[in-house]
Image (spheres, rainbow, N blue to C red):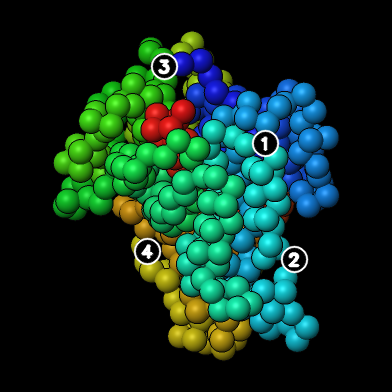
Amino acid sequence: MSDRLTAIDLFCGAGGISAGLHEAGFDILWAADHNPDATATYEHNFGKPEYGVVTGDLSELDPETELDGLEPGELDLVAGGPPCPTFSTIGRSKIQSLDTKTPESDDRHHLYEDFLRFIDYLEPSAFLMENVPGMRSTTGVNGEPIVDIIRDQMEALDYTVHVEVVDAADFGVPQHRERLFFIGEREPTTEFQLEDWKSHRAPRNDSESEMKLQSNPDIELDSPQSTVTEFGVTLDESEKGNNLQPEDRKPWVTVADAILDLPPVSPDGGTPPTQAKEYTVPSLTEYQDWARDLESDTDWEEAELTNHRSRGHNLTDLTLYKILGEGVGWNIGKVDIGLQPYREDIFTDKYKKQHPRKPASTIVAHLQKDGHMFIHPREARSLTVREAARLQSFRDSFEFTAALTSNFKLVGNAVPPLLAEAVATAIREENL
């Protein structure tokens, strides 16, 4: 392996991409986001990189000024995920409901152009840009597919560009989350495919969906913690011929694998409390062991647990949560009109209990509003920030520092670190 490479993170959010890049062998030199809660959380977890963390509108930031001293061609990677409301199905519906706006006229529709502006100046060896798969069905003002428009603009900057859609569950994330990646490279690799870097697969039978218990649940007390590479792509398996074949990939990580070691909490106080600050049982699965991220000499009973707090719920919601079966979602139209929390013409499925033997459904920023789509599989409540973060593949050592609702938004908007690690590792090994 070569020395650590360099990268910057545009539209960094709380730091999902940066967390993955760090594990893949990159040092982050600079990061930027318009949300002060995001940048505060970012600095809390990563500290200040060499060129700092900037809170501001990327369209108003000049790469030459912000990265003074970093010459064009010196940077290895530019990464980022421009905000995607105008490319997502729900986002487009919301914008089209406003009399004065269309998705194409929304300013956020063109934020990717600022991403390209930084690439144009910095001339990195490679770049990765993440967005929602809904971008594939979006067109520009002239009716041309937006994916083709963006790819043409990227290739005009002298990059070979690959566009792929992947499911985060195939890379060890305990969540089905499809994401679109634009990957650009100065030195083209014709065989480059993220498909080759998958580490997980659908279960072959029911037994592979059961919680994957460690042979010795107390192993964390006596030996070092497992590493991120047990669930993503390992840096040692970097040669293309050494990548995991489909038959060697592990079954998807499930909701139970990811969160059922976390203590119970009650949305209405009493016993158990609304917030738990310590673990009550040892980790039971490899993923839980990895997520706790404890030093080898740290007793789990003495470790601090953060962000494991539940929002409140009214009695109607709690009753519906209790009635729902595992993995069951109720269409709003099937629920009595008095129980419907949203407009049926926009939202079609807003009560869903997560299935413990499957990856979670896509964690979204709407969690800041309520948790109806993310009901705990065993308790009559919605998920805590920590549970949502685990399903996004953030370790427990990653602390979200904003208010509760803002923390839910930060988690929902993030790129899963394990997915970012896999993509960055693929780019590093194939191109850098």
Q: Disc 3 to disc 4, how far (Cα)?
A: 43 Å
Tally of marks: 4
Give the mark nearer the N terminus: 3 vs 4.
3
Which label sits on residue 107?
2
- Under tag 3, what secondary structure? loop
Q: Percent x, y for residue 290?
A: 43, 29
Residue type beneath disc 1: Leu
- Under tag 2, what secondary structure? helix
Cβ atoms at labels 2 and 1 below 8 Å apart: no
- Asked whether, in this view, residue 288 is left or right of residue 368, the answer is left
* Nearer mark to the viewer, of 4 and 1: 1
Q: Would you name the residue on which mark 4 appears? A: 327
Give the mark nearer the N terminus: 2 vs 1.
2
- Asked whether, in this view, residue 231 is left or right of residue 207, the answer is right
Q: Quadrant of the N terminus?
A: top left
Residue displayed at 36% across by 62% down: 326
Q: Would you name the residue on which mark 1 appears? A: 122
- Under tag 1, what secondary structure? helix
